[in-house]
């Protein structure tokens, strides 16, 4: 089908407007959208204007499906003003490389204290993993990511999907096996060591849930593979 | 099950000698339980007239009931009026004839009742809420009986033609919602949204406490029409009496064959579950309510898909407000033409409002759509000092007194920057500061924002900070521009209706009372409400040195030196006691 974006006509397939715009090479800032999670609608940065009955209406592109003949504006003054306004709010209340990067485009100073922007990615991947170890607690400005009742939880398996997907580094994991969001401890994990080199590899719970038989770290695995390859190729 | 038999039983218990007391939460708060006990009376729902509670009806055999107001002791109480028990109901009811009291005023002659049309509140204050026989005697369950003989499509057509729109506030056409759900396949749900959270609004509570079967019957008809066998009533736990009443009513309806398997001996089965909400305002938003029933935090979800397509557990779900459901039986029984004969071109039927604030007659009223705000406030409420009317709760707007001729109509209220909302109507007098009013509502919405999306969570907090500064006398011209800019971001970019409408009180007060904001920036609160901007002093030329202010000052800031009273400004806590007690207007408030 055909759509018009910022005055240019494109041939596109059915699907999510944000993904299609990104594929076409348009720069649409977005935080809470992830292909694995789908649209969540929290960050509101992916807003665009679409024409509905002759009027331009502001919508989040992540929650809009493309329709044939759709007219889209991605960088009108209206959109830029709103986006800048949202980033100003983020920059006032939070700080992280991600927000620095967004704010620098508009020349906004970042002065917030917290890292977490409540994009919900961590909570949503935890739910996809089936663990539901973290969720939101509180309302409004008090809202935060937390394990149940803000008490270290046994439910967490230590898969670290939350740590890996967090765009601001608000959820962290350290060698001691602690997962921490902002200053709140989510879980404490017993870590299993690599049976060859002794480095920490994976949490015991996650290894068990995956049914791992032997614990070997990436580096040792690579060395073993290389050695076997060399042997088969008769390289010294 | 025999409808006729239950009806006869109901008629028997409605007539004869009968004393009733309004014992909804509002009545109880006014002391109705004590009165009920002393008179050995029956408890009924609320007749709506809050400022006249406790309300007692005394009915002698063969005579129409007489209503007494503000009853402490019946012998000393004032008569409000008499009425026939069936006369508020729009349904044609064949009841035994009663003798009127033509020497006494009739209830309808009272300004509070004169312009009311009771469709939703038809039984409130008349029947005992948990008497299914009395409910049936007043025409209840006749609509369900009729509906079960109709095709579901015919019911939906009837609702569509009636023009009924969602009474929760947004005003989406109910019939259209049902039709969408009807067309979707598979398991479906119906939900009653009873998460009433607007400050000062208690329409839903009153219906649930006073006439629970009307909602249950409406839901049962709706479920039959869309093809659902399971319904939920989501009611806030802060309404303990409503929760208890509903739980009992569902059980009674089931025991009598109006819920459960093979309802009224038909093939249709339907059950209702009560879900208690934990008190988050945002859970009144339909997708947040659905998330809450599912056991997730009460956060709104992206629409589309709308609940009628994918709602509770991703199944098609019809979600309507208490008042919407209570309208359904009347539309089915009396036909769409009757319902559509009330109202304006696009807003049909009646609307229940809770009229509170600076009015003489506070209470719950039901008026035809299209009535003007002026009639509601001045004639029904008998207010004599009005500056503005706030409609639509904390996310509605303030309509100034000059524009009060606007008819109550979904579109017309939006044109003025307000909304119909669920029916909260707060009358604001000239002693209120409009900046302070906007601050109050922003404080509410910022605390009740779920926090999911950035504009609402951070934007409202920012707006509150700015308006707080203005009320503290630290505002500037730029602050007003900043407020307007933030309001635009929050209203345009927020995820759900809460954020999209939360700036309304600010925007309407800025539009209609801008001068008050500017006065605050100049360092003056014209209404004398914002304490940081108020200063009390004593005018020596008017002061007669009676010393009443000195006695009443809680901090000892008023002292007499050389026969003249004066206020120590460093000590003064601006409580205004001196201003209120002075009989000579010698205390000046600037």
Image (cartoon, coloured by chain):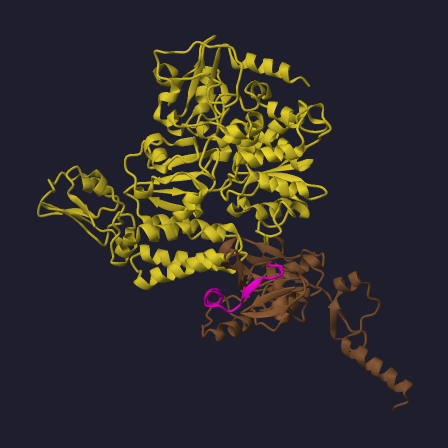
Q: Position of residue B74 (x, y in %)?
A: 39, 16
Tell me what hue chain B is rendered in: yellow
Q: How many marks?
A: 0
Q: Position of residue B161 (x, y in %)?
A: 55, 35
On the rendered structure, is A213 left or right of B373?
right
The residue that appears at 18% across and 39% down in the rendered structure is: B582
Q: Is residue A208 above or below residue B404?
A: below
Q: Quadrant of the N terminus of chain B?
A: top right
Q: Is residue A191 above or below residue B198?
A: below
Residue B141 in view, yes or no: no
Residue B514 in view, yes or no: yes
Q: Position of residue B150 (x, y in %)?
A: 66, 28
Q: Based on the picture, tell me whether residue B29 belongs to the magenta stretch.
A: no
The residue that appears at 65% across and 35% down in the rendered structure is: B153
Please name whichever residue, B298 or B327, is drawn nearer the observer in this view of the structure.
Answer: B327
Q: Which residues are magenta?
A: A64-91
Please name whichever residue, B569 or A5, is drawn nearer the observer in this view of the structure.
Answer: A5
Residue A223 quadrant: bottom right
Q: Position of residue A37 (x, y in %)?
A: 66, 61
Q: Based on the picture, tell me whether residue A84 belongs to the magenta stretch.
A: yes
Q: Is residue B284 above or below residue A224?
A: above
**The chain drawn brown is chain what?**
A
Residue A59 quadrant: bottom right
On the rendered structure, is A8 left or right of A175?
left
The residue that appears at 60% across and 59% down in the rendered structure is: A64
């Amino acid at each position: 089908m055909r759509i018009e974006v910022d005055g240019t006509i494109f041939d596109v397939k059915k699907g999510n407007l944000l993904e299609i715009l990104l594929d076409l090479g348009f720069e649409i800032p977005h935080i809470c959208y992830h292909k694995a999670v789908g649209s969540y609608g929290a960050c509101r940065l992916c807003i665009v204007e679409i024409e509905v009955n002759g009027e331009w209406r502001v919508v989040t592109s992540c929650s809009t499906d493309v329709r044939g003949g759709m007219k889209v504006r991605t960088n009108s003054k209206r959109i830029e003003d709103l986006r800048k306004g949202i980033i100003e709010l983020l920059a006032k209340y939070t700080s992280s490389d991600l927000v620095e990067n967004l704010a620098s485009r508009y020349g906004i100073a970042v002065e917030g204290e917290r890292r977490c922007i409540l994009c919900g990615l961590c909570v949503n991947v935890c739910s996809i993993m089936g663990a539901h170890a973290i969720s939101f607690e509180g309302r409004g400005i008090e809202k935060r990511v937390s394990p149940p009742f803000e008490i270290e939880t046994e439910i967490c398996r230590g898969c670290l999907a939350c740590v890996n997907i967090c765009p601001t580094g608000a959820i962290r994991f350290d060698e001691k096996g602690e997962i921490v969001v902002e200053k709140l401890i989510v879980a404490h994990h017993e870590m299993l060591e690599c049976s060859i080199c002794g480095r920490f590899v994976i949490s015991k719970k996650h290894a068990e849930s995956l049914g791992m038989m032997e614990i070997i770290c990436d580096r040792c695995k690579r060395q073993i593979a290389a050695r076997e390859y060399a042997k088969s190729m008769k390289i010294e | 099950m025999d409808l006729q038999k239950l009806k006869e039983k109901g008629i028997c218990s409605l007539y004869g000698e009968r004393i009733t007391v309004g014992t909804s939460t509002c009545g109880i708060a006014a002391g109705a339980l004590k009165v009920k006990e002393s008179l050995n009376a029956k408890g009924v729902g609320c007749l709506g007239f809050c400022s006249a509670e406790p309300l007692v009806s005394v009915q002698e055999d063969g005579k129409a009931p007489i209503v007494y107001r503000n009853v402490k002791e019946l012998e000393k109480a004032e008569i409000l009026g008499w009425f026939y028990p069936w006369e508020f109901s729009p349904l044609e009811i064949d009841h035994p004839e009663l003798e009127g009291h033509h020497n006494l005023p009739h209830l309808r002659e009272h300004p509070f009742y004169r312009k009311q049309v009771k469709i939703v509140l038809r039984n409130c204050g008349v029947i005992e809420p948990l008497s299914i026989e009395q409910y049936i005697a007043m025409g209840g369950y006749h609509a369900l009986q009729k509906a079960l003989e109709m095709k579901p499509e015919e019911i939906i057509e009837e609702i569509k033609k009636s023009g009924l729109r969602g009474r929760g506030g947004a005003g989406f056409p109910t019939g259209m919602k049902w039709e969408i759900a009807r067309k979707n396949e598979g398991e479906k749900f119906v939900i009653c949204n009873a998460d009433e959270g607007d400050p000062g609004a208690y329409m839903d509570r009153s219906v649930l406490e006073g006439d629970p079967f009307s909602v249950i019957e409406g839901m049962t008809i709706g479920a039959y029409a869309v093809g659902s066998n399971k319904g939920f009533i989501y009611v806030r736990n802060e309404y303990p009496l409503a929760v208890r009443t509903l739980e009992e009513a569902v059980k009674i309806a089931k025991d009598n064959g109006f819920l459960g398997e093979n309802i009224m001996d038909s093939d249709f089965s339907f059950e209702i579950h009560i879900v208690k909400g934990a008190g988050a305002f945002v859970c009144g938003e339909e997708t947040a309510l659905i998330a809450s029933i599912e056991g997730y935090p009460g956060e709104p979800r992206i629409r589309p898909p709308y609940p009628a397509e994918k709602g509770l557990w991703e199944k098609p779900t019809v979600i309507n407000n208490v008042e919407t459901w209570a309208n359904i039986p009347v539309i089915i029984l009396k036909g769409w033409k009757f319902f559509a004969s009330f109202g304006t071109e696009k807003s049909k039927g009646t609307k229940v409002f809770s009229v509170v604030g600076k009015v003489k007659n506070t209470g719950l009223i039901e008026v035809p759509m299209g009535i003007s705000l002026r009639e509601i406030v001045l004639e029904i409420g008998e207010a004599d000092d009005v500056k503005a009317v706030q409609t639509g709760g904390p996310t509605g707007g303030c309509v100034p007194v000059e524009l009060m001729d606007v008819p109550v109509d979904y579109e017309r209220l939006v044109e003025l920057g307000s909304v119909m909302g669920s029916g909260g109507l707060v009358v604001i007098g000239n002693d209120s500061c409009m900046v302070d009013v906007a601050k109050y509502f922003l404080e509410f919405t910022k605390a009740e924002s779920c926090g999911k999306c950035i504009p609402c969570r951070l934007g409202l907090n920012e707006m509150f900070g700015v308006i707080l500064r203005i009320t503290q006398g630290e505002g500037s011209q730029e602050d007003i521009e900043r407020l307007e800019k933030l309001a635009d971001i929050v209203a345009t970019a927020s995820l759900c209706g809460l954020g999209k409408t939360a700036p309304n009180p600010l925007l309407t007060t800025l539009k209609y009372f801008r001068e008050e904001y500017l006065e605050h920036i100049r360092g003056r609160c014209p209404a004398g409400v914002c304490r940081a901007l108020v200063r009390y002093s004593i005018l020596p030329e008017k002061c007669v040195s009676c010393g009443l202010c000195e006695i009443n000052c809680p901090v000892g800031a008023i002292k007499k030196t050389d026969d003249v009273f004066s206020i120590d400004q460093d000590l003064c806590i601006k409580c205004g006691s001196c201003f209120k007690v002075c009989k000579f207007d010698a205390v000046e408030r600037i």
